[in-house]
Image (cartoon, rainbow, N blue to C red):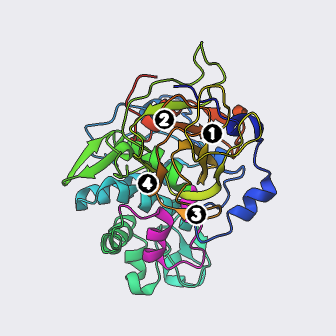
């Protein structure tokens, strides 16, 4: 299959002002234009810390129980006490039988609400007399999840395990919570004044869950069991990602014979449904011009024609961009539309620079739609529990 698309070579990075405008909608994508990189986890080394990168990339399964009394890895953005609080949140979820997607949502919520600190409140004098890790001043909110009096007594809300349990009790009552965007679910539980703020923490929350619980963010619950690396056909991993189509990778990323191939080609029959790999906002949904400036995507293309055919670019929390090329008909989504992970956005075809039906799939970092922002989708998706079924 041959599909060097113009979309990957002609367009440059998103301008930061454009990104800011794009992210002002109902969803999730706050602070993904530069701040997110600081949240990426890196091991600090030392006798008391395991290597976080190694833990986060450990082969998934079996999911291990968190030992909150044992040694825990260190992270650049969180101190030991904060990571201990994260471990408590995960452990409570495990003890309650909440699927691992819930642990990711709970961690992301506590990151936003308290930066994983058990906060007293300067306006609640009784809280200042109890063990705490700083004092907030948001109404009468307390603890890791900034819970108000309706959630429990002052002492209860300042007990991390209690606060986590109350969060999970409400979480599991949210309809279809495992498939909905993290920010929508967290908002249903918290009723926050800043409902779009939670999703910027989804990536680092997933990495912490992976590091502390044996790759648990790479699992998806199927028939009541946590299955590793099985997020496809609309199943969503705890990380929030899914494979865009089932199928094997044919032509790989920047191979010796195709050094400018900035994605991978996944073989599939014409008309196969293509799903959004994660929740995001549509940046582009159009027919890409070929080498002669034509926009004739309603016919099969051919090698050397140029262009991505009918294609879609999605912007996700964390500044990630995914690209889906060569659709058979006009995509089912429009520019600026919010799409959810697993939502069908189009169908496999052979429009543009293509020798047969397949999906050309790309992943870009740091809001950069150009070739310089592209990374190999195979390891990227594997690390999120939504592997593309082929060798790199």
Q: Residues within 10 Å of mark 1 (few under 14, many from 20)?
A: many
Residue at (49% x, 82% y) in the render: 126
Q: Residues within 10 Å of mark 2 (few under 14, many from 20)?
A: many
Residue at (53% x, 51% y) in the render: 329
How far from the left and from the top, in percent, is residue 265? 50, 31
Which residue is labeled 4 in the image? Answer: 86
How far from the left and from the top, in percent, is residue 250? 45, 24
Looking at the picture, tell me which residue is in the foreground, 216 or 46: 216
Part of the protein shown in magenta:
178-200
As displayed, is residue 280 above or below residue 48?
A: below
Which residue is labeled 3 in the image? Answer: 28
Secondary structure at badge 2 equals helix
Q: CA distance from mark 3 to mark 2?
A: 26 Å
Q: Horizontal placement of 90 versus 206: left or right?
A: left
Which residue is labeled 2 in the image? Answer: 52
Q: Earlier in the sequence, mark 3 or mark 2?
A: 3
Secondary structure at badge 4 equals helix
Q: Earlier in the sequence, mark 4 or mark 1?
A: 4
Q: CA distance from mark 2 to mark 1?
A: 38 Å
Q: Are marks 3 and 1 in contact (CB under 8 Å)?
A: no
As displayed, is residue 116 above or below residue 255?
A: below
Mark sitting on residue 23: none
Mark sitting on residue 308: 1
Q: Earlier in the sequence, mark 2 or mark 1?
A: 2
Residue 216 figure quarter: top left
Looking at the picture, tell me which residue is in the foreground, 44 or 348: 348
């Amino acid at each position: 299959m041959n599909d060097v698309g113009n979309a990957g070579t002609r367009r440059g990075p998103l301008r930061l002002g454009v990104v800011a405008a794009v992210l002002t909608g109902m969803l999730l994508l706050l602070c993904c234009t530069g701040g997110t990189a600081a949240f990426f986890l890196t091991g600090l080394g030392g006798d008391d810390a395991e290597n976080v990168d190694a833990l986060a990339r450990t082969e998934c399964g079996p999911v291990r129980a968190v030992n909150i009394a044992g040694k825990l890895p260190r992270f650049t953005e969180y101190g030991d006490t904060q990571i201990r609080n994260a471990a408590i949140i995960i452990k409570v979820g495990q003890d309650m039988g909440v699927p691992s997607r819930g642990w990711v949502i709970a961690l992301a919520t506590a990151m936003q609400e308290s930066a994983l600190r058990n906060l007293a409140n300067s306006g609640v004098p009784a809280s200042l007399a109890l063990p705490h890790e700083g004092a907030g001043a948001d109404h009468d909110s307390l603890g890791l999840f900034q819970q108000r009096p309706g959630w429990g007594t002052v002492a209860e809300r300042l007990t991390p395990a209690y606060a986590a349990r109350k969060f999970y009790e409400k979480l599991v009552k949210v309809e279809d919570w495992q498939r909905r965007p993290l920010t929508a679910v967290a908002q249903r539980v918290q009723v926050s004044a800043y409902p779009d703020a939670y999703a910027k923490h989804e990536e680092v929350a997933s990495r912490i869950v992976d590091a502390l619980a044996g790759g648990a963010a790479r699992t998806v619950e199927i028939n009541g069991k946590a299955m590793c690396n099985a997020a496809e056909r609309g199943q969503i991993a705890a990380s929030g990602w899914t494979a865009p189509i089932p199928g094997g990778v044919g032509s790989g990323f920047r191979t010796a014979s195709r050094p400018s191939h900035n994605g991978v080609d996944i073989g599939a029959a014409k008309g196969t449904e293509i799903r959004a790999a994660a929740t995001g906002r549509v940046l582009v949904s159009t027919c890409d011009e070929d080498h002669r400036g034509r926009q004739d995507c309603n016919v099969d293309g051919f090698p050397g024609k140029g262009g991505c055919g009918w294609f879609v670019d999605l912007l996700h929390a964390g500044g990630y961009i995914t690209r889906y090329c060569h659709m058979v008909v006009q995509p089912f989504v429009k520019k600026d539309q919010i799409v959810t992970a697993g939502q069908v956005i189009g169908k496999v075809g052979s429009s543009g620079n293509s020798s047969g039906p397949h999906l050309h799939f790309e992943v870009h970092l740091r809001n950069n739609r150009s070739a310089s922002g592209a990374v190999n989708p195979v390891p990227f998706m594997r690390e999120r529990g939504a592997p593309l079924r082929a060798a790199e």
